[in-house]
Image (cartoon, grey):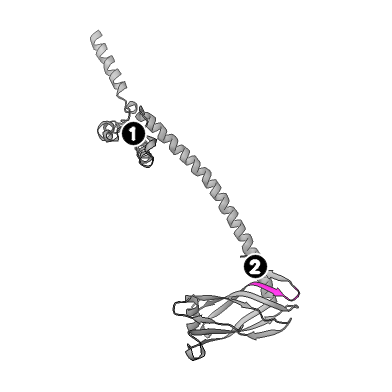
Amino acid sequence: MKHKAAVIAIAILLAACSKPTETIIPSDMAKWDTELAPQMKKLSEEDRADLTGYLMRMKMLEAFDKTAGGVPLGTTVGDAISAQKKWKADAAAAKAAQDVIDKKRKEDADALSAKVAAERKAIEDRISAAVTIAITDKKVLPEDMSNSRFYDFLVLTYAIENKSDKGIVQLKGTFYFKDATGDEVGMLPVTFDQAIAAGKTLKTDTGRGWNVKSYGPKDLKDIARHDLATMTVKFVPSSIAFAGGEVLKAPE
């Protein structure tokens, strides 16, 4: 009976010593497949995943930094699993903290964007209340070397009504063109430097046009080739200067 009890005790001791978590991870990676793989099979799926993650991290660390030394000597499978769980928890906590920061930044950016958009809309509305502008004609003058016109030349004619009680010194904005189906055709920024007296309407081509080059902006070419009668045009003002020095300017 004593002999049998001794055998059982030894068996229990050997079983206790053969726990996979107590296995020391070989510092030589070449031995992982032969010495470590059998012990990994004894682990739970979760622990096996954590050990695999740890070993992969150590491989990457050693690959990028030879002084890192890979897996520290004497590290057991249990140590590695614990280290990986802590690393994941720390990473999750860091991500959660960064998510809070990113959310706050986005909220601040959205709030600022909404504020600027509201300010811009308010200025645009004030300018639109002071002036009405329309394109009354569109011409494309053909290339004519004899007149030093080296490209087709787009010319727009405008009617600008000053509805305010002040003279207008300068007006800036952008025309947006859409075709008959409502698709975008293009956009053209414009500046009007001609004075417009209070309550008066000015008809002008601003004294300038656009060279429609084959390699130039697509907007110009598309606007030039479309019939004005088939397009809808919207003018979005950006700034206006009145006689006397008052300036309204929408934020960028």
- Mark toward the viewer: 1 or 2: 2
Asked whether 239 falls inside the magenta stretch, the response is yes
* Dominant SS in magenta: strand
Residue 111 image offset from top left, x and y in percent: 61, 56
Tell me which amino acid carries mark 1: Ser
- Amino acid identity at mark 2: Ala
User: Which residue is under mark 2?
Assistant: 250
Q: Which image quadrant for residue 18?
A: top left
Name the residue nearer the viewer: 170 or 161.
170
**Residue in view at x 65 percent, y 70 percent:** 124
Looking at the rendered structure, the secondary structure element under dot 2 is loop
Determine the CA span between mark 1 and mark 2: 64 Å
Residue 141 to residue 72: above or below: below
Tell me residue 135's x, y (percent).
Answer: 59, 83
The residue lying toward the viewer, choosing from 167 and 64, is 64
Based on the picture, tell me whether residue 11 belongs to the magenta stretch: no
Q: Is residue 216 visible?
A: yes
- Residue 102 higher or lower than 166, as above or below: above
Magenta extent: 238-244
State the residue at coordinates (64%, 86%): 203
Asked if residue 34 lies left or right of residue 80, the reply is left
* Residue sitting farthest toward the bottom: 146
Residue farthest along the top direction in this orientation: 2
The residue carrying pointer 1 sits among few (fewer than 14), some (14 to 19) or many (20 or more) residues within 10 Å by Cα, namely few
Q: Which residue is mark 1?
A: 44
Above-or-below relation of 123 to 179 = above
Q: Position of residue 3 (x, y in %)?
A: 23, 9
